[in-house]
Image: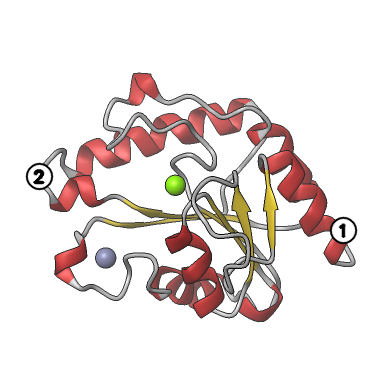
């Protein structure tokens, strides 16, 4: 069993115009590539965990969602970063599925499929639902940006401005 870093997608790795559905509009955030490279070099598999309720709401279909994913993968690979896995929840809040964050279902599935020990792993995201999902799965959590949470949220272990800072914090907490 090994440790991993689970990552939200929108406004964590790439900029989010809201229900991102145009592959040509995918833009990596400042600090994203450098941070991801650093975690990867530290031996940490990177696994994407993303809610895409735009599918369930009918704003775009799953093929479009995967086209956006493909473009993200291309940009990451051009920067030397490989994702070890990617999990998407296409449902809406009213579907009450077990996978939509803040539910931890996608992290549990990823842990089973990639033989990850959640208790020594990390979840990074920009929303309360990201860090809540990570904590409910037993991970340590990093909130990107500081806008959306009260400072003493029980679900947040640290707040970082970007993925480069998150990588420094995570690698500083583990022996790699
Ligand atoms: Mg996000
Ligand atoms: Zn779901």
Q: What is the C-alpha distance between the residues marked 2 and 1?
A: 42 Å
Q: Looking at the figure, which quarter contains the N terminus?
A: bottom right
Distance from mark 2 CB to nearest ligand 2 atom below 8 Å = no
The residue that disc 1 covers is 172
Q: Position of residue 27 (x, y in %)?
A: 48, 24
Q: Residue at x 39, y 74 (%)?
A: 105
- Asked if residue 42 shows in the view, the reply is no
Q: Position of residue 175 (x, y in %)?
A: 89, 67
Q: Position of residue 123 (x, y in %)?
A: 59, 62
Where residue 80 sits, quadrant-wise, is top right
The residue that disc 2 covers is 58
Q: Residue at x 39, y 39 (%)?
A: 69
Where residue 46 sits, quadrant-wise, is bottom right
Q: Is residue 46 left or right of residue 62?
A: right
- Asked if residue 23 shows in the view, the reply is yes
Nearer to me, 158 or 74: 158
């Amino acid at each position: 069993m090994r440790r991993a870093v689970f990552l939200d997608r929108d406004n964590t790795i790439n900029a989010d115009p809201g229900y991102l559905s145009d592959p040509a509009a995918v833009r990596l955030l400042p600090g994203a590539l450098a941070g991801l490279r650093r975690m990867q070099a530290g031996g940490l598999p990177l696994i994407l965990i993303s809610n895409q309720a735009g599918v369930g709401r009918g704003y775009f279909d799953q093929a479009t969602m995967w086209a956006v994913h493909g473009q993200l993968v291309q940009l990451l690979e051009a920067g030397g970063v490989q994702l070890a896995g990617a999990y998407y929840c296409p449902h809406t809040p009213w579907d009450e599925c077990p996978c939509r964050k803040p539910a931890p279902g996608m992290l549990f599935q990823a842990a089973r499929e990639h033989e990850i020990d959640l208790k020594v792993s990390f979840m990074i995201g920009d929303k309360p639902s990201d860090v809540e999902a990570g904590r409910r799965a037993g991970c340590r959590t990093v909130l990107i940006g500081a806008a959306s949470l009260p400072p003493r949220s029980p679900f947040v272990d640290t707040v970082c401005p970007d993925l480069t800072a998150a990588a420094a914090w995570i690698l500083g907490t583990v022996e790699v």
